Amino acid sequence: MPRFVDLSHVITDGMRTYPGLPEPHVFEHLGRADAERIYGPGVTFQIGMVTMCANTGTYIDMPFHRFADGHDLTGLALERVSQVPAMCIDCTGMRSIGPDVLDGLDLRDRAVLFHTAHSATFGTEAYFQAHPFLSPATASALVDAGASVVGIDSLNIDATHSPDGDGRPVHTALLGARIPIVEHLTNLDALPADGFVFTAVPPKIEGLGTFTVRAHAVVG
């Protein structure tokens, strides 16, 4: 039997995903008491509302996030991010993840997920400090290898606390090659190194380069 693994963080009212970005507000447009007044006694519906930054929780980046002439969410080819044969690379204990972790791996048309264990600190101040990231050389290797989509369970796939992140070279390389990026993954420790498929499909919204996804894997 296949095993489904949820790889997304729960979105809650007021949660923080990234320093300086607005927090989501989750509330009701129509509550059950008001619904009874509209539809009759015992007939209740709940209609919810959410206002949030597109970069909330676990989200995916499109080329438009980095490049004005890149495609937005509506231009995403589903085969890049839906039921993609995947591999999970154990990078726990590493800060700057170099290209040597890719040695000998066939990454063409694969989802490549980097497990750093940093997601264990999500929801705390530690999540925003000293996070793991890919080196520019690793991004170049992923482009050359023809990866379909790249994900990480960290605050950012680029360095944000060192010169390695100046100009966001990893975003630039991957999104420049039309390779989507999924950040803030979680539960990667529940995945094998290989033998599973990965899905991270966003809604089809025109004019956005980033949006929340329900990322998940199917193992076996």
Image (cartoon, grey):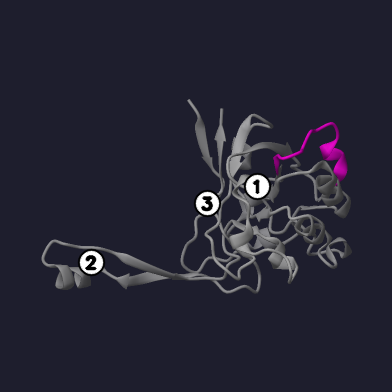
Q: Position of residue 201 (x, y in %)?
A: 56, 52
Give the numbered dot on residue 118.
Answer: none
Q: Earlier in the sequence, mark 2 or mark 1?
A: 2
Q: Position of residue 75 (x, y in %)?
A: 63, 59
Q: As shown in the figure, which amino acid type bears the numbered disc 2?
A: Arg
Q: Position of residue 176 (x, y in %)?
A: 79, 59
- Residue at position x 55%, y 35% in the image: 218
Q: Which label lies toward us, 3 or 2?
A: 3
Q: As shown in the figure, which amino acid type bears the numbered disc 3?
A: Arg
Q: Nearer the viewer, residue 29 or 161?
A: 29
> Would residue 87 appear left or right of 34 to someone viewing this image?
right
Q: Toward which corner of the image does residue 18 lie, by quadrant?
A: bottom right
Residue numbers of the magenta segment: 98-112
Q: Earlier in the sequence, mark 3 or mark 2?
A: 2
Q: As shown in the figure, which amino acid type bears the numbered disc 1?
A: Arg
Judging by the rendered image, the residue that carries numbered circle 2 is 32
Q: Earlier in the sequence, mark 1 or mark 3?
A: 1
Numbered label tally: 3
Distance from disc 1 to disc 3, alpha carbons, whole Å, reads 15 Å
Judging by the rendered image, the residue that carries numbered circle 1 is 80
Q: Is there any visible trace of residue 175 in the rendered image?
A: yes
Judging by the rendered image, the residue that carries numbered circle 3 is 214
Q: Nearer the viewer, residue 204 or 192?
A: 204
